[in-house]
Amino acid sequence: MKVKTSLVCSGVLFILSLAFFPGGGLAADKKIYTLDQCVKEALANNWRLKAKKETIDQAQYVKNQARADFLPKLSTSYGFTRYKSLRTTQIQGGTFNIGSLNNYQWKGTVTQPIFTGFALISTYRLAELGIDESELVVQLETLDLALNVKTAYFDILTADNAVETAELAAEALESHAEVARNFYKVGMIPINDLLRSEVEVGNAKQYVVRARNAARLTRSTLNTILSRPVNAEVNIVDIEVHEVQKGDFQAYLEEALKNRPEIKLIDNNLLQTDQVINITESKNYPEVVFVWEYTKEGDSPSVDGGAGHEPSNWAAQAALKWTFWEWGKTHYAVKQQESIKNELLKTRMQMEQDIQLQIKDSVLNIQTAETNIPITRKAVEQGEENLRVSQERYKAQVSTSTEVLDAQRYLSDARVFYYTALFQYHLAKARLQRAMGTY
């Protein structure tokens, strides 16, 4: 009796769970992604982007290292020296031993740089610019990643529509082949007409297989970008909205020159080169350092004094070092960095031209797609009507099988061209955003 009661309760709970949570865990596995959701998930999970973000921490550690060079350095040493024989000295005709055979010494040193020809401050500023560079590299990777996500997304939509087109063509050709078989049975068409129809059916089925595999591959590509299992199921929202793109080339260009991380990277590299020049020119100046040493000596490991040894002592020293002549080595090193700076300036000018070309290419692609979308949509409507008429004419035996097969091929091509134009429009918009430094 208790067993039956438990089974009844379990059944009631199961029914209630279906009522309040329809789909259960299966629905979670079949999440439908929008384009924005794909971009957000990629920015959160993509391994390549995460790897790039590590460079920011690395640059911060380099900055911390440069800051440490401003502070005094502490060092210590401990040594043992044994002489073959005691040292002696002559004093008023007498010979006296000096020191001991066993000698121990412990030394502590504090070293503080006073002036390095502005090398330390320039190195620190160079490290700060290294952080900016790493952040710009992450921005660049983010833009590329967002574009890759959009490209993969539109590739899926294109592939899915190719599958649908292939399946519709296969169904239509199979229906036509069935009509041809019936006509052949009653002797209305020759065998070669039937065989031609059968061959086209076989070809269409092969194309369906290839189209489905291509669609699976596009999903695997998106999964890889999102750092998901390569075979994970991906369902995405279709995008067919076509909004006319309004904008001005000059406005796009100004936005790009303001936002593009590539331009900012070159500007940052120019600042880095200035700091490298300062570091190089620092060799024209003397270096001043303060050193304080504390020393303990003795004839035993405890270094607490002994014959000829002071138990402890200290010394302070301000030292100046200046290598003032190296036969133009520093001069040529500075010239090298100035040449690098000129190279960067010319690279920046070329980058601006490349950006103009990228924007022009994206704008033209958008215009091309906007022109082709209504043309290809009309072609699909005409292709559908042409196929319908051809099928009716064939059934009335006033046309050949070739006319029907050609009509089906024209319709399939028109559908492919339409969906290609539609998604190329969205892709061109995405590339325009990338060219302007946004996503």
Image: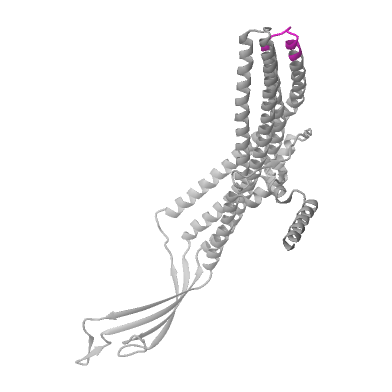
Residue occupying image coordinates x 73% and y 25%:
372
| 32 part of magenta stretch | no
**Dividing the image into 4 quarters, which one contains the C terminus?**
top right
**Quadrant of res 304:** bottom left
Please provide the residue range marked out in magenta: 391-402
Residue occupying image coordinates x 53% and y 71%:
71
Left or right of 320? Residue 414 is right
x and y, in percent, of residue 118 in the image: 53, 62
**Quadrant of res 434:** top right
291 to 359, vertically: above or below: below
How many numbered markers are drawn? 0
287 to 251, vertically: above or below: below
Q: Residue furthest left?
A: 93
- Judging depth in this view, the residue of 267 and 137 nearest the camera is 137
**Quadrant of res 236:** top right
x and y, in percent, of residue 387 in the image: 74, 17
Q: Residue furthest front?
A: 1
**Dividing the image into 4 quarters, which one contains the N terminus?**
bottom right
x and y, in percent, of residue 395 in the image: 74, 11
Residue occupying image coordinates x 71% and y 36%:
429
x and y, in percent, of residue 162 in the image: 67, 29
Left or right of 106? Residue 253 is right
239 to 391, vertically: above or below: below
76 to 206, vertically: above or below: below
